[in-house]
C-alpha cells in the first residue's frame, strides 16, 4: 500500500473538514457568541495541525495511482478522522463530554441523527448549524463531495467512489469520476436550495429552513427543537417534508440521468417504483390501524402515517407525533420500513430496496431452477440482466446486516438493556434512522444508553454508513500484509 499517497489525501480531507467549519464560525462571529467562536477556531486549528502532520509524511507524485487497498484506507480512515475532528466543537464549547461528543459527531456524519443532547433548544445557533452541516456533508458522502470540489484522485478514483457508495451497485453516468461526483453534488445542492425555499414558504425562519433542508435531503434528521417537526404543528410543512424525504430516498444517480434524459427515467426505475409502493401500502395499513385502534380521525391518521412512514423509510427520523404510543401493528410496520430503508445510491440508510428486489428474484429463480434443473435462470432489474456476483453480494450483505443487528443487540443486553429495547436500538442504529421505540423513543436518541453501548453504537453507525465490508477489510490483519492479492 502506498502509505505516502494515503497520508497526503487524508491531509486534504482534514483540511476540507476545517473549511466546513467556516459557516458556523462566521455565524458565531455575527451573533457575538465568543464561546462558539473560540470552540470553532480551536477545531479549525486542530484540522490544520492534522493536515500539517499528514502532509509532512505524505505527498502526491505524478505517477501515483490509487489501488483498491489505498481506496479502502482513505475511505475508512478519512471518515474516522473527520468524525473525530467533528466532535471538537461540542467538547471545546463545553456542551458534551468526550464520549458523548464523539457519539454526536459520528451520529451526525453517518446520517443516523440520534442525539445525546437532552435539550437541543439551549444550544447556540452555530452548534445547531454544525450538527446540520455534519448531516449534510455525510449524507451524499464526504469523499464524493471532496472529489467534486478538490483535485482529482487520479485514475484509481473509481476504487474510492465504489468504497463509499451505498447499494449493491455503483452507478456511473459519466466517463470521468470527478464529473460524476460533480453531477451528483450539483443535484444535491439544487435539491437542498429548493427544499430550503419551500420550508421558508411554509413558515419557517431562514435559519430553521436551511437547517431542516440540509438534514432532510441528507436524510439525517437533526432538528433544532426537542420535538423536531412536532413543535411546529404545521400540516403543510409535514406534507412538504414527506415529499422531500421520499425524494431523497431515490437514487441521486437516477436524478442525474433524469436531468439529461427526462423524467421518464424516474418512472421507469423498478427500485423507486417498489419503494413508492412500500410507502403507500405501509401508510395505508397504519392509517387504518390508527383509526380502528386509537379512534383517530381519517385525515389526521393519513397525515401522521404518511409523514412517519416517509421519515423512517427514508431513515431521516423526523418526528411529528409520539409513534412509540401507536398500536403494535403500526410499530411493527415502522420497524420494517426502518430495516428496509431507501433506494441504492440515495442518502437513505437501511438494507436498500434494490437488495430486497434482488433477493426476492433470486429466490424465485432458485425455485424455478429446482423445477427445471437444465434451465439457465437470470435475475433482471430495470430490464437488464444483473450479474451473479451482484446478486450474491446482496445476499452476503443481508446476512452481514442481520449478524450485526444481533451482535449489537447482545452487546446492549450485556450492558443491562432489556431485549425489546436492545433490538429496537440495534435496528435503528444499523439502519441509520435515529429514533426508535422504548428507551430510545421517538425523540430520546442515545442519551439514555450506558457508556459501553454508546461506544459500540459509534462502531455500528460507522459500519452501517460504509456498508460493513469496507470497514471489516481495513480491520483484517491481511489488509496490512504485503501481498500480491491486493
Image (cartoon, rainbow, N blue to C red):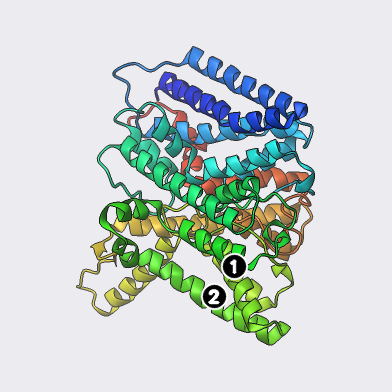
Q: Residue 64: where, in percent of width, then height?
A: 32, 21
Task: Report the disc number at residue 429.
Answer: none
- What residue appears at the point 51 percent right and 59 percent down from the top-left corner? 244
Q: Residue 373: where, in percent of width, then height?
A: 24, 74
Q: In this view, does 304 lie above or below 15?
A: below
- What residue appears at the point 59 percent right and 40 percent down from the top-left corner? 134
The reply to whether residue 121 is in sight is yes
- What residue appears at the point 57 percent right and 56 percent down from the top-left corner? 201
Q: Is residue 63 above or below residue 29?
A: above
Quarter holding residue 317: bottom right
Name the side, left or right, on which 427 lies relative to 61: right
| Residue at the spot of label 2 | 282
Q: Residue 284: where, in percent of width, then height?
A: 55, 79
Residue furthest top in the image: 56
Q: What element carries label 2?
A: helix
Crowding near the residue tagged with mark 2, few <14, some 14–19, many ≥20 C-alpha atoms within 10 Å: many
Q: Residue 81: where, in percent of width, then height?
A: 57, 30
| Residue at the spot of label 1 | 307
Q: What element carries label 1?
A: helix
Name the side, left or right, on which 452 lies relative to 147: right
Crowding near the residue tagged with mark 1, few <14, some 14–19, many ≥20 C-alpha atoms within 10 Å: many
Q: Is residue 98 above or below residue 139?
A: above
Amino acid at each position: 500500500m502506498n502509505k505516502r499517497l494515503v497520508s497526503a489525501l487524508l491531509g486534504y480531507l482534514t483540511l476540507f473538514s476545517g473549511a466546513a467549519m467556516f459557516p458556523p464560525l462566521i455565524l458565531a462571529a455575527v451573533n457575538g457568541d465568543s464561546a462558539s467562536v473560540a470552540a470553532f477556531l480551536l477545531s479549525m486549528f486542530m484540522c490544520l495541525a492534522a493536515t500539517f502532520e499528514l502532509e509532512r509524511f505524505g505527498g502526491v507524485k505524478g505517477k501515483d495511482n490509487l489501488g483498491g487497498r489505498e481506496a479502502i484506507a482513505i475511505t475508512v480512515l478519512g471518515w474516522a478522522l473527520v468524525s473525530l475532528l467533528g466532535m471538537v466543537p461540542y467538547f471545546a464549547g463545553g456542551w458534551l463530554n468526550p464520549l458523548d461528543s464523539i457519539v454526536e459527531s459520528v451520529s451526525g456524519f453517518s446520517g443516523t441523527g440520534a442525539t445525546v443532547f437532552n435539550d437541543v433548544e439551549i444550544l447556540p445557533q452555530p452548534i445547531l448549524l454544525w450538527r446540520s452541516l455534519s448531516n449534510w456533508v455525510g449524507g451524499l458522502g464526504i469523499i464524493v463531495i471532496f472529489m467534486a470540489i478538490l483535485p482529482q484522485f487520479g485514475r484509481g478514483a473509481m476504487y474510492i467512489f465504489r468504497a463509499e457508495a451505498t447499494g449493491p451497485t455503483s452507478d456511473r453516468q459519466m466517463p470521468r469520476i470527478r464529473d460524476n461526483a460533480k453531477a451528483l453534488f450539483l443535484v444535491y445542492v439544487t435539491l437542498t436550495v429548493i427544499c430550503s425555499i419551500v420550508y421558508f414558504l411554509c413558515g419557517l425562519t431562514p435559519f430553521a429552513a436551511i437547517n431542516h433542508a440540509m438534514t432532510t435531503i441528507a436524510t439525517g434528521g437533526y432538528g433544532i427543537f426537542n420535538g423536531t417537526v412536532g413543535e411546529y404543528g404545521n400540516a403543510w410543512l409535514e406534507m412538504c417534508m414527506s415529499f422531500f424525504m421520499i425524494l431523497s430516498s431515490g437514487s441521486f444517480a437516477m436524478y442525474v440521468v433524469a436531468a439529461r434524459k427526462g423524467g421518464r427515467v424516474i418512472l421507469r426505475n423498478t427500485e423507486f417504483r417498489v419503494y413508492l409502493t412500500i410507502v403507500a401500502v405501509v401508510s395505508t395499513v397504519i392509517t387504518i390501524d390508527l383509526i380502528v385502534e386509537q379512534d383517530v380521525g381519517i385525515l389526521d391518521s393519513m397525515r401522521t402515517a404518511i409523514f412517519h412512514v416517509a421519515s423512517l423509510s427514508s431513515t431521516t427520523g423526523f418526528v411529528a407525533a409520539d409513534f412509540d404510543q401507536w398500536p403494535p401493528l403500526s410499530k411493527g410496520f415502522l420497524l420494517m420500513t426502518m430495516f428496509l430503508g431507501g433506494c441504492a445510491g440515495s442518502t437513505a440508510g437501511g438494507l436498500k430496496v434494490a437488495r430486497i428486489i434482488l433477493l426476492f428474484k433470486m429466490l424465485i429463480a432458485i425455485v424455478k431452477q429446482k423445477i427445471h434443473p437444465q434451465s439457465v435462470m437470470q435475475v433482471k432489474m430495470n430490464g437488464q440482466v444483473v450479474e451473479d456476483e451482484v446478486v450474491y453480494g446482496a445476499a452476503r450483505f443481508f446476512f452481514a446486516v442481520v449478524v450485526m443487528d444481533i451482535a449489537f443487540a447482545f452487546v446492549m443486553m450485556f450492558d443491562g438493556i432489556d431485549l425489546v429495547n436492545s433490538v429496537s436500538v440495534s435496528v435503528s442504529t444499523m439502519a441509520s434512522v435515529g429514533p426508535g421505540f422504548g428507551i430510545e423513543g421517538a425523540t430520546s436518541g442515545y442519551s439514555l444508553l450506558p457508556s459501553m453501548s454508546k461506544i459500540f453504537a459509534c462502531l455500528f453507525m460507522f459500519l452501517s454508513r460504509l456498508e460493513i465490508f469496507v470497514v471489516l477489510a481495513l480491520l483484517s490483519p491481511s489488509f496490512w500484509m504485503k501481498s500480491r492479492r491486493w
